[in-house]
Every structure is written in C-alpha cells, then in structure tokens.
Amino acid sequence: MSYSVGDALPPFVIPAASPDAMKHWAVFLADPNPIHLDVDVVKAKGLGDKRINQGPMNVAFMMNMLMAAFPGCRIESMDSRFLDNVYEGDHLTASGTVTAVDGNRVSCEFTLNVADRGTVNSGTATLII
C-alpha cells in the first residue's frame, strides 16, 4: 500500500473507558494507585467523581490505532504527551495523520480525543512498514 503526507489514518474508537479494564491494568502494571480503582479516593483528591484511566492504557489505544492503520508494521519510535485525564465511561477516538514518508518509514502525528471534551493525549511516531 502507498502512503502520502497528509493521509488521515482510520480512527480507532473505544466506546467507553472500562473500570473493569482499569482493574486488570492495575495488576499487570503493578500500579496500586487507588484513583484507578476507587471513586471515593478520586472524589477525596478533588479529581472528579469517576475512576481515572491509567496513562499506559491511553498510550496503548493510540498504539492500537497505529498498528491497525499499518498492519504488520513495527513502531520504531513514539512520543506522547498527556494533556488531560481519561475517566471511566469516556468515549475515546484515536486518530492520526501521516507527516512524512521516507522509504519504508512513515511518520505520523496522532491524538486521543474524548467526545465532548477534546484532546487528552497527543504525540508522534515513526513506523517501519
């Protein structure tokens, strides 16, 4: 397949950030932070009234979008920036754009957006296709 600068990548949609997934990720990330597991802690810290998704899971959503857009690729490098929290129940869309093509390397910019709230993560990646 051929890619060009400016090509939009197919969006990767997460219908709702799952509190059950947060429980599983807390285990394999060895992340006992209660903001991912206990609404009362989130409220006590003044961070809202819903559990907060783990950052690595948000990055994984963006990686899944890249891997789906470029089947069989390898992510050579990736940087991302956390701009806001993702809360349980948030409807998410990861999307991106091709910014450079150099032989079998494709560079992209991407975002993770929450419906009705905007961009919560953004970044860049170079993939080997």
Image: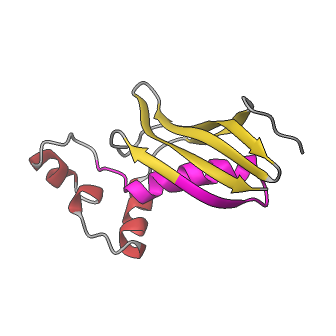
Q: Nearer the viewer, residue 93 or 49?
A: 93
**Coordinates of residue 109 in the picture (x, y in percent):** 59, 39
**Coordinates of residue 11 in the picture (x, y in percent):** 65, 37
**Coordinates of residue 123 in the picture (x, y in percent):** 51, 43
Q: Nearer the viewer, residue 102 or 67?
A: 102
Q: Which residue is found at the position 69% from the left and 54% from the top? A: 127
Kindly tell me whether residue 92 is visible in this rendering. Answer: no
Kindly tell me whether residue 70 is visible in this rendering. Answer: yes
Direction from residue 93 to residue 35 in the image, left or right: left
- Please tell me in which quadrant of the rendered image residue 124 appears: top right
Bounds of the magenta segment: 51-78
Residue 62: say if magenta.
yes
Extreme residue toward the left, this view: 44
**Coordinates of residue 93 in the picture (x, y in percent):** 55, 37
Q: Quadrant of the C terminus?
A: bottom right
Q: Nearer the viewer, residue 66 or 26?
A: 66
Q: How is the image coloured?
A: secondary structure
Q: Quadrant of the N terminus?
A: top right
The correct choice, above or below, for 77 with respect to 29 in the image is above
The correct choice, above or below, for 76 with respect to 68 in the image is below
Residue 65: say if magenta.
yes
Direction from residue 112 to residue 43 in the image, left or right: left
